[in-house]
Image (cartoon, helix red, strand yellow):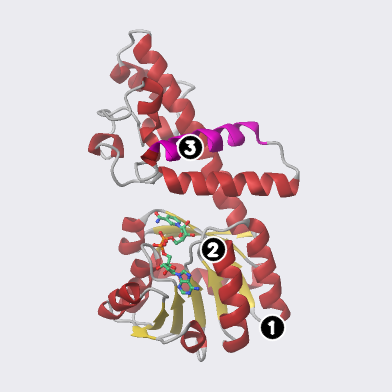
Amino acid sequence: MTRIAFIGLGNMGGGMAANQVKAGHQVRAFDLSPAALDKAVAAGCTAAATAAEAVRDAELVITMLPAGQHVRAVYANEVIPNAPASALLVDCSTIDVDSARAVGEQARAAGFRFADAPVSGGIMAAEAGTLAFMVGCDDADYPAYEAALQPMARAVFHAGGLGSGQAAKICNNMLLGISMIGTCEAFALAEKLGLAPERFFEIASKSSGQCWSVTSYCPWPGPVEAAPSNRNYEGGFLSGLMLKDLKLAQAAAASSGATTPMGAQAEALYALFDGLGYGQKDFSAMLQLFRGKLDS
Ligand code: NAD
């Protein structure tokens, strides 16, 4: 049994903390939202009055917060001044690479081990304990992180040193955003050309246009039964979250001097889609923008 402090019990963190309880660990939880904290208590966590109190005698500290500014503030003001230096620190939020590195360096300077470990998989995977973690940490620390994340995971990958977890996450999601837009454009064009979309799916799935967005997550309703396109694009991976990740990718490209013109286009298109009020729809609903049938 490990004494775990869990900070940030929202859509993702709530399910993740519950899985640590199920694995037999003692979880002291904190969230600014009383409703989120109550839910965690119902799942077997103990409520802490502050983040500082949650981490005070923790062996493992897990944070799952909205963005870089929250992670910077929670580590600087609560975790680093109050946790025992022996505690293993891991931030699972999706944040900018620069914040992940800055927080990690601050933690290391205070004698802590730290990892950035963002996840792939949504709310259902968080509840089911089937997330994929991309971990950025020192080689020597990785086995401890792999074991600590296991109760919440389907897979744990060591991406590299500090910040590499966030780098892997945003590079992957930038590629996904671009490939989904390309897939949507191709289906919209196929339709205009009088090519049956189902036939195009069969052909592209076995030709050089094959990719995950076509074969496993087809935006055209029908060919892939489990895809959100068959549920009016409800659930799945929200367009608003894709936009967040594409913005992080563009910020990282600007600060590292990388050239990512397609990533920039993808960000602009998802910003447009979000502005039209479709941020809560699955990101494959972009197809309907290109078809001129957004409400269908
Ligand atoms: P959420 O908004 O549901 O949860 C965040 C929680 O953090 C909230 O309950 C909020 O009250 C709490 N919080 C904010 N500041 C705090 C503070 N200072 N101290 C304590 N608690 C604080 O968000 P989420 O959907 O759970 O996402 C969390 C992270 O996971 C984000 O970085 C997101 O990008 C990433 N992510 C989300 C998904 C998804 O499908 N929702 C998938 C992969 C990754």
**Percent coordinates x, y for residue 142 in the rendering:** 59, 69
Question: Horizontal placement of 255 versus 26: left or right?
Answer: right
Any mark on residue 111, and which? 1
Looking at marks 2 and 1 on the same chain, the residue that comes earlier in the sequence is marked by 1
Q: Amino acid at mark 3?
A: Tyr
**Percent coordinates x, y for residue 100 in the rendering:** 63, 63
At horizontal 54% and vertical 71% (from top left) the residue drawn is: 90
- At label 3, counting other C-alpha atoms closer than 10 Å, the crowd grade (few under 14, some 14-19, many 20 or more) is many
The furthest residue to the right: 257
Helix or strand or loop: what does disc 3 sit on?
A: helix
Gap in angstroms between the C-alphas marked 2 and 1: 19 Å
Any mark on residue 117, and which? 2
Q: Quadrant of ligand 1?
A: bottom left
Q: Amino acid at mark 2?
A: Ala
Q: CB at mark 2 closer than 8 A to ligand 1?
A: no
The residue at which mark 3 appears reads as 270
Helix or strand or loop: what does disc 2 sit on?
A: loop
Gap in angstroms between the C-alphas marked 3 and 1: 41 Å
Instruction: Classify 90 as above or below 12.
Output: below
Q: Identify the magenta region.
A: 260-276
State which quarter of the image contains the C terminus: top left
Q: Nearer the viewer, residue 18 or 234?
A: 234
Q: Are marks 2 and 3 in contact (CB under 8 Å)?
A: no
At horizontal 38% and vertical 66% (from top left) the residue drawn is: 10
